[in-house]
Image (cartoon, helix red, strand yellow):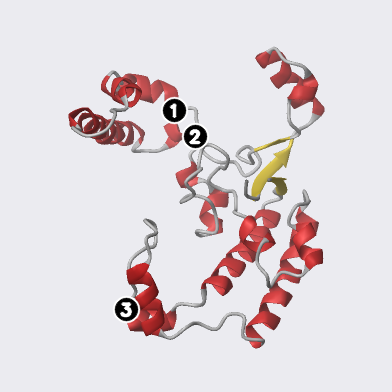
Amino acid sequence: MGLDWHASEEMTDQERRRIANEEDCHLEEVGRFRSPCYLVKAPRVKDRPTFEKDMREQLEMMQEKAREEDQRESGRKNEGFIEHWMNMTVEKMIKENGDKFDCKNCPLLKDLQGADSTGNLFLGVTVSSCDFRGKGIARDEMTPSHLVDKCYETMCPDDMEEFADELEEVLEEGIKEGWCEKEPYEEYKKEWEESPHPFRGELMTEEEYEETPHWREMFWRQAIHWLRTCAKHGVIMDVTY
């Protein structure tokens, strides 16, 4: 299992007791942290001016996928998926989604500028949109052991700022030492053409490749930006691994 950094807010004992009462469980079963939606004043989906239009378009898209699944001739059909979406109505979607927080218009997510988990395959399962894949830092051979340990710690905003500064110092030194030097374009192109990975992205032109930083530098700068941005919003870093 990987390591994820979760943008979080610590709940008060009163809030945890309320949740325990609502869910009819023991207080010990209620975690200390929750997503920072309340803290950063994220809007609700129903607050969008295009809310009903968005729900209608989403339903049309999902029902089209359900019809394609139903007409698929090879393999086992996902009957649950087909039944769920073909029986769904706009009214039901409006009722089910209206009070959810609107990640698309969340001030924290906008400030993260892509240093997040919106493209994570486990979005909605083990991670939220505003989380970050800390595994990439913890398992990078460039990361000193004392910073690897920090990757697995829950941190307050001040600690996150300090951690970001430490990572940035290591990155800048690593760039000087050649840790972020890219291979020649022809080698990159050959590896791309031979790669079986389904999520390898589009092949870059030589000009695009030259303008794009090494993957390590991009990822480290995203991690640093995530830490500093969350800290600025008063958000805590919780971890799971």
Asked whether 30 or 48 is in front, the reply is 30
Instruction: Give the residue at mark 2.
Output: 44
Instruction: Give the residue at mark 3.
Output: 205
Asked whether 96 or 169 is in front, the reply is 169
Residue 92 image offset from top left, x and y in percent: 36, 19
Q: Residue at x 37, y 63 (%)?
A: 201
Q: Nearer the viewer, mark 3 or mark 1?
A: 3
Query: Badge 2: few (under 14), some or many (20 or more) residues near its Cα, within 10 Å?
Result: some
Q: Residue at x 26, y 22 (%)?
A: 86
In the depicted structure, whether residue 101 falls above or below residue 19: below
Q: Are marks 3 and 1 in contact (CB under 8 Å)?
A: no
Q: Tag 2: residue type?
A: Arg
Residue 91 image offset from top left, x and y in percent: 32, 20
Q: Are marks 2 and 1 in contact (CB under 8 Å)?
A: yes
Instruction: Give the residue at mark 1.
Output: 98
In the depicted structure, whether residue 236 falls above or below residue 89: below
